[in-house]
Image: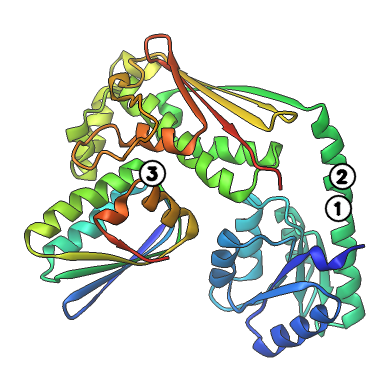
Amino acid sequence: MEITLNFNEKTALMKVDGIITSDNSYIFQEKLAEVLKSDVKKLDIDLSACRNMSSIGIGKLLLFYKDFLTRNGEIEITKSSPAVYELFTTIKLNQLITINL
Amino acid sequence: MDENLYNILIVDDDIDLLNSLKSVLSLYQYQVDTASSVNSALKKITVNHYDLVVSDIEMPKRNGLEFLEQLKKGMLINIPVILMTGHLAVDYAIEAIRLGADDFIKKPIESKVILKAINHQLIKKRLQQKKEKIDNKVQQFSVRFEFTPEDFLNQSIPEYVIHYLSKNIRIPLKNLNELSICVEEIITNAFLHGILNVPSEVRRKAYKDYVVFINQQMDTDKSKKRVFVEISYSSSEHLLRLSVKDEGDGFNTHMFIQNNKPLINFDSATGRGLNLIQILSDRLSFSENGTRITIEKYIDEE
């Protein structure tokens, strides 16, 4: 699993390639922490190459969401693979975060 | 053979060649998709179904051999791969065969050569599928694994189990993705929660603090406990059963949601894994005081 993170003025752009599992979720956590430390107000996540995400990965995203929200941050999943899109809509994560296919 | 049923992915950094091959193969009613890099091909392969891949070997960044290795060690071991190369160096050929290449064709590509190679691989694949269909009629697959916490920390057991399943049972990618999350959640829970008793607050800590806690637990008798993974598959019912027993405390079964519409637990740090398993499997049950979890999942026919 690989994660690239770039900053563009007030937006952070994250791209995940592979499956977020319990083994590698700490990488996801560390990248999200980098976003939290910055002064960006928006995080765009590209999950088109992310084939799936475990509950630990979802947990990391939710923890980040709560912290980011307290400073008026906004998350958008700009692209997602069919498997991730289906998973996130099934668990109703789309009620919290904008998710695009 | 009924060629128009087959989807082919061609991978080459030479766009002119991609267009030209696409035109030729389309004339023979193949459904052709193209990718100009290995990364692009890997992305396409995760979302689309292909019956065969034709890939160049020499490409910038990641070459055809790396691509082949990714395919053959991953979930797509059964897709035939034909490699194209400008020069058939022996070293390349040996490495490609070791990695599982099914055929080679030399550049510049002649239409009749590539058509013959594709046709040959698709016939071989169709015969293999027929054989598997016959075998599957009587197939009752059953296997049992035993793992220690040390195994869990040193290798990806969920990945190993899924790879084993994909090698032995024909599972469509959608089912395999769903199963991979179930296997991941169940096995991770068996070790982290069941045996090593990692509390949720430790899981939320920075990675180095988490590692310190795990190492402390591994210095105790907990490191000697085992997890048993039992898998059975009935091809007549298309039903896969996965049962995992840990010698520790098992699942936190009071989180087991009895209603039929499980929702992810956004506010609690625990229970999400169980929610996912319940959503992605067809049946979920616990026994032996929560130390054995069993799921059943129907596998779609391809």
Q: On the image, numbered disc 1 is attached to which residue?
A: B126
Instruction: Evaluate if marks 2 and 1 touch, with contact meaning CB atoms under 8 Å apart.
Output: yes
Q: On the image, numbered disc 3 is attached to which residue?
A: A54
- Of circles 2 and 3, which is in front? 2
Q: On the image, numbered disc 2 is attached to which residue?
A: B130
Q: Nearer the viewer, residue B218 or A91?
A: A91
Residue B74 visible here = no
- Graded by Cα atoms within 10 Å as few (under 14), some (14 to 19) or many (20 or more), the crowding at tag 2 reads few
The quadrant in which the N terminus of chain B is found is bottom right
Say which amino acid is labelled 1.
Arg
- Check the residue under mark 1 and report the chain it is in: B
Q: Secondary structure at mark 3?
A: loop
Quarter of the image holding residue A59?
Answer: top left
Q: Have a look at marks 2 and 1 and say if they share a chain.
A: yes
- Check the residue under mark 2 and report the chain it is in: B
Q: Position of residue B287 (x, y in %)?
A: 44, 12
Say which amino acid is labelled 2.
Lys
Q: Position of residue A72 (x, y in %)?
A: 9, 64
Q: Position of residue B76 (x, y in %)?
A: 65, 52
Residue A3 falls left or right of residue B112: left
For the point 61% across and 71% down, the residue is: B63
Residue B193 visible here = yes
Residue at the far top in the pictured view = B288
Residue at the far left in the pictured view = A71
